[in-house]
Amino acid sequence: MAFGIEDIADEVAAVLISAEIAADVDFSPTVELPESEKLRVLVCPGGLDGEVENRLADQEDHVIHVGVIVRVGKDCTGDNIREQLAFVRSIRDLFKRRLLETTRVTLAAFANNPIYRPEKLRDEGLFVSVLKLTFRGFR
């Protein structure tokens, strides 16, 4: 079955939603949080790398970015930051050793660097972190 990176993004969002984490696929994300919201989780296709394995299959690595934006306030404490970092880790852990059923890809790598954006915290009271998930599949 043919699938694209957008299908993987949809499936990542579905996994998050099934874990009771509200998530939206966004192809043009912004680092903003309306005053009425406390938390936003955005799933964004990020890139594709591939290799020809043999005559019958190609290996493809699909990068999906999961952005977490939380209103914590400018006066947040280290405990607030630790709580948000644990939340980001919990998102990552949802995909470890898990086959995404529809697209048949698995998590091959992840990155969270930098772990959050201190300037957004300082200037706007927003905790902003982007988790890079690389899913590997074969075609």
Image: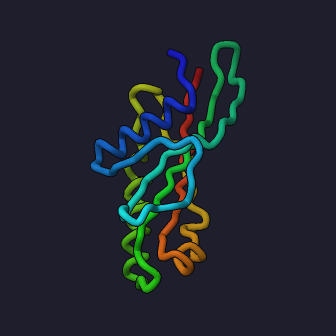
124 or 35, which lies in front? Answer: 35
Q: Quadrant of residue 5?
A: top right
Percent of width and height locating residue 104: 46, 27
Q: How is the image coloured?
A: rainbow
Percent of width and height locating residue 120: 56, 73
- The image shows residue 6, relative to residue 111, as above or below, that is above
| Residue 3 left/right relative to 91 | right
Q: Quadrant of residue 30?
A: bottom right
Q: Quadrant of residue 81?
A: bottom left
- The image shows residue 13, relative to residue 128, as above or below, that is above
Residue in the picture at 40% in, 74% down = 72
40 or 94, which lies in front? Answer: 40
131 or 107, which lies in front? Answer: 131
Percent of width and height locating residue 8: 49, 33
125 or 105, which lies in front? Answer: 125
| Residue 67 left/right relative to 14 | right
Residue extending farthest to the front is 35
| Residue 109 left/right relative to 100 | right
Percent of width and height locating residue 44: 54, 44
> Which quarter of the figure is the C terminus placed in?
top right
Residue in the picture at 52% in, 75% down = 124
